[in-house]
Amino acid sequence: MRIWDISVKKLCRQHLLGEHRELHALWSIIIKNKKGYSHHPETMRWRGKLKVLYQRHEEEVKEMNRRGYCHLSPLDKKFAQGKNKQNIFIDTIKNQKKILKNKKCECKI
């Protein structure tokens, strides 16, 4: 489970769509107080930051639309509360770029 801290414009198709699925999973875990993955480091770093997670989703949607994908899974904006900036990182942005580069995918890193 991962939400990258890199511009969605740089993500390849696989990572953009994968992140979108995982963002929806995180959103559901947090707003419905689900037990599964509730203590995962990625989940923990987004608690209290649904406002910025919502913004990340909107960036994904914009990029998906730009690439011609059909988006049909909006988030309920009433839950978009909390901090509007993510300041906790599991990996530094520099390390995230290195991880993506080593995957030899089509990400624009």
Image (spheres, grey):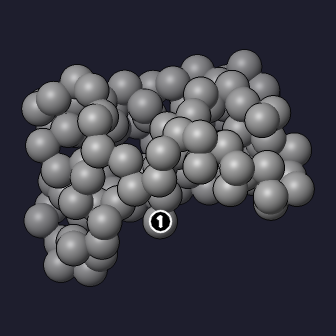
- Mark 1 surroundings within 10 Å by alpha-carbon count, few (fewer than 14), some (14 through 19), many (20 or more): some
Q: Residue at x 37, y 47 (%)?
A: 89
Quadrant for residue 97, please give it. top right
Describe residue 75's horizontal placement relative to residue 35 as left or right: right
Quadrant for residue 84, please give it. top left
The answer to whether residue 38 is above or below residue 86 is below
Which residue occupies the foreground of this view, 50 or 62? Answer: 50
Q: Which residue is drawn at 88% across and 56% down?
A: 104
Q: Percent from the top left, x then y, of residue 25?
A: 38, 60
Question: What kind of element bears circle 1?
Answer: loop
Describe residue 35's horizontal placement relative to residue 62 as left or right: left
Q: Residue at x 30, y 72 (%)?
A: 40
Residue 70 visible in this rendered orientation of the protein: yes
In the rendered image, which residue does mark 1 sit on? 1
Q: Residue at x 48, y 45 (%)?
A: 92
The answer to whether residue 49 is above or below residue 17 is above
Q: Percent from the top left, x then y, of residue 86?
A: 30, 34
